[in-house]
Image (cartoon, rainbow, N blue to C red):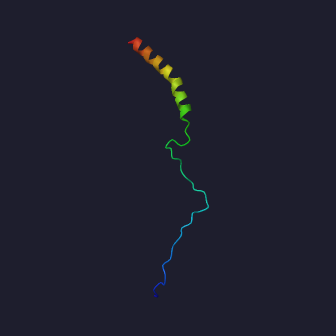
Amino acid sequence: MRAQSKPFIVEVKSSRRPERRQSASIWGNLDLAAVAEEIAEEMPQQSAALEETAEAR
């Protein structure tokens, strides 16, 4: 095998295809505001049920 006469440079070019990045959030597309509203609507019902059971004792 012959010795190389001069060094060479390898250039890595970026792909033109758009990257398929995953969402940075572990929650994805979950609407946390909607979930908070649902929980807020359920909370008064749960506290009223707890008061009724406490009064029954």
Instruction: Specify the farthest residue to the bottom.
Output: 2
Q: Is residue 56 above or below residue 31?
A: above
Tell me if 29 is positioned left or right of 3 in this view: right
Q: Is residue 42 above or below residue 13?
A: above
Q: Is residue 54 above or below residue 37?
A: above
Q: Considering depth in this image, is 18 or 3 the residue closer to the camera?
A: 3
Q: Position of residue 10 (x, y in %)?
A: 52, 72
**Residue for point 53% across, 47% down:** 23
**Residue for point 53% across, 70% down:** 11
Q: What number of labels is visible?
A: 0
Q: Position of residue 50 (x, y in %)?
A: 43, 18
Q: Considering depth in this image, is 48 or 24 the residue closer to the camera?
A: 24
The quadrant in which the C terminus is found is top left
Instruction: Specify the farthest residue to the left.
Output: 57
Q: Position of residue 2 (x, y in %)?
A: 46, 88
Instruction: Specify the farthest residue to the front.
Output: 6
Q: Position of residue 36 (x, y in %)?
A: 52, 30
Question: Which quarter of the picture shows residue 38?
Answer: top right
Q: Considering depth in this image, is 6 or 11 the residue closer to the camera?
A: 6
Q: Considering depth in this image, is 47 or 40 the residue closer to the camera?
A: 40
**Residue for point 59% across, 63% down:** 15
**Residue for point 55% across, 32% down:** 33
